[in-house]
Image (tube, coloured by chain):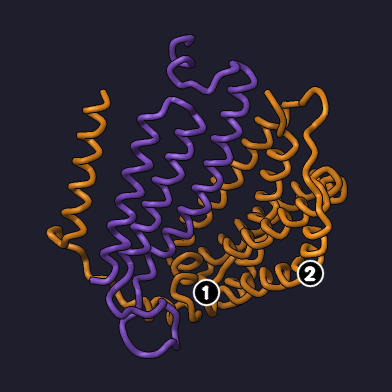
Amino acid sequence: MESLSALALAVALALLGLWVLVGRRNLVWKLLGLNVASGGSILFLVALSHRPGARPPILGLGPGPAADALPQALVLTAIVIHFATLALALALVILLTERRHTQDSRKLEEEG
Amino acid sequence: MRVLLALALLGLGGLLGLGIAGLWPRPEPQDPEPVARAWGVANAVAAVVLGVRLWDTLFEVLVYVVAMVGVRFFLGGLRWRGELPPVAETPLLRRSADLLLGPILVFALYVAASGHLGPGGGFPAGALLGSALLLLALAKGVERLSQELYEPRLESLEYLAVALLLFLGAVVLIFLVRAPAAFIAANLLIALEVAIGAWAVLHRFASARGEV
């Protein structure tokens, strides 16, 4: 199974991102972790859609099995949504920093 | 707390590892060719994105627009006191922008217009157009570029593109249109909308730079 290494890398990326997302206290670091975890999940979906010896899911590219088109379409959606939500979250962090002068999630929680 | 977190992550990784090792039943992927043939396009991914799962794409575009409106709303109220730190300008960047801008634009249009035939589509084309705008902004300076690209007009163009896209989606869904022309139009509209949204984000973040 040739996509195994890609799957392992995807899981490693997702775990690393989740670790940073939960473990760090700085909001920008948290968003970075979310970004990495999202990249891992995207890689996971793409690697899942692959079959050994598969060709791209486009007509007329020769014989053989085609890669599954559904996860790829899902990933297309996920990347754009990822970009949009990341931009929105960064804008909110900028606004929060402007108002409260801190990016520490624990301090923000304590102050209420 | 850290120990619990580590345990939870290890458990998640173990579950994923079990899934990868093939111990869970995985459905055999379906052959995408009949889907592509049924919609009259060559790219099965385009047939899925803009055909079978058109509802998903329409609502994804709506989520994108709402997020961009949110960025404009939240960053629009911020006004920075004092001088903005200058963006470095070099002749190298300006010259390479002159050289690269045309090919990037043409390639983005090609990717958008041929998304139903091969790899490509509206979203990659929009990202390409957005990166062309980023290159232009780096070469000319964001302030000058934002004076030339009048943003309220671009904003109304973006909303017009979204409205046209929704109308097109409604036509495809109601009358069950299965023509490549609908795919080309939808891809071009999506590219326009994504590019303008990316420019709005870039512009807002660049003009809100500085120290807090």
User: Which of the chains is purple?
Assistant: A
Q: Position of residue A63 (x, y in %)?
A: 35, 90
The amino acid marked with disc number 1 is: Pro
Mark-to-mark CA distance, 2 and 1 = 25 Å
Q: Position of residue B156 (x, y in %)?
A: 76, 48
* Image mark 1: chain: B
Please say whether residue A53 is visible from this viewpoint: yes
**Which image quarter: residue A89?**
top right
Residue highlighted by disc 2: B99
Quarter holding the N terminus of chain A is bottom left
Q: Residues within 10 Å of mark 1 (few under 14, many from 20)?
A: some
Q: Does A88 appear above or below A106?
A: below
Which of labels 2 and 1 is toward the front? 2
Q: How many marks?
A: 2
Q: Does A10 appear above or below B112?
A: above
Foreground residue, B177 or B65?
Answer: B65
**Which image quarter: residue B12?**
top left
Residue B119 bears which disc, if any? 1
The amino acid marked with disc number 2 is: Leu
Q: Residue at x 51, y 66 (%)?
A: B50
